[in-house]
Image: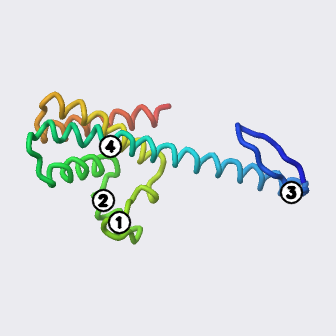
Amino acid sequence: MVIMAKDGFTFLVMGYRGKKAVAFKEAYINRFNDMEAFISEQYAARMGFPQFTEAVQMAHGEPKSYHFSNECDMINKIALGVPVKAVRASNGVKPGDSIRPYLSDIQIADIRTLQMADIGLLTSGVEFQERKRALAEYHGRRKVVRLSA
């Protein structure tokens, strides 16, 4: 058994050799790195959510629960292309459970980015329909840039 370090973490390598063993080890490392990125992105989104809720509160003075759900629904629909209800149905997610484990890294990053942009629009006093249009346009431009890269 050998201990190897790669990309900042240490793992045990069984004494297996050969092309299949190397491919398995590389796939394991890649999957681990993917999981680490996914967890980091979820954590970042969770840390930014209090700022988002504060911006909704400031924009509405005495906000109702639907103010928060309307903002979240708008952002999720722009980022995912479908309502959250459709994501729940296609993945068998119960109401109240998070859909984030079923999203790709790009989708989670898009949601987080749109939340940050929405914070700026909310605090600037931009009305809901204008925010929706601006965020959809911004998201479309980001997709074009990502596809051209």
Which residue occupies 21% across, 53% down?
A: 69
Q: Specify the amino acid type for callout 4.
A: Phe
Residues under labels 2 and 3: Cα distance? 43 Å
Q: Specify the amino acid type for callout 3.
A: Met
Residues under labels 2 and 1: Cα distance? 6 Å
Instruction: Determine which residue is flagged by label 1.
Output: 88
Which dot, 2 or 3, sits closer to the camera?
3
Q: Are marks 2 and 1 in contact (CB under 8 Å)?
A: yes
> Counting residues from the N terminus, which is met first, the one under dot 2 or under dot 4?
4
Label 4 sits on a secondary structure element that is helix
Label 4 environment density (alpha carbons within 10 Å; few <14, some 14–19, many ≥20)? some
Label 2 sits on a secondary structure element that is helix
Q: Specify the amino acid type for callout 1.
A: Arg
Left or right side of 84 for 42: right
Which residue occupies 91% across, 56% down?
A: 15
Q: Residue 127: give its label.
A: none
Residue situated in front as seen by the camera: 86 or 144: 86
Q: Are marks 4 and 1 in contact (CB under 8 Å)?
A: no
Which dot, 4 or 3, sits closer to the camera?
4
Instruction: Determine which residue is flagged by label 2.
Output: 84
Q: Quadrant of residue 43?
A: top left
Residues under labels 2 and 4: Cα distance? 17 Å
Instruction: Determine which residue is flagged by label 3.
Output: 14
Residue situated in front as seen by the camera: 9 or 32: 9
> Counting residues from the N terminus, which is met first, the one under dot 4 or under dot 1?
4
Q: Are marks 2 and 4 in contact (CB under 8 Å)?
A: no
> Counting residues from the N terminus, which is met first, the one under dot 2 or under dot 3?
3
Instruction: Determine which residue is flagged by label 4.
Output: 49
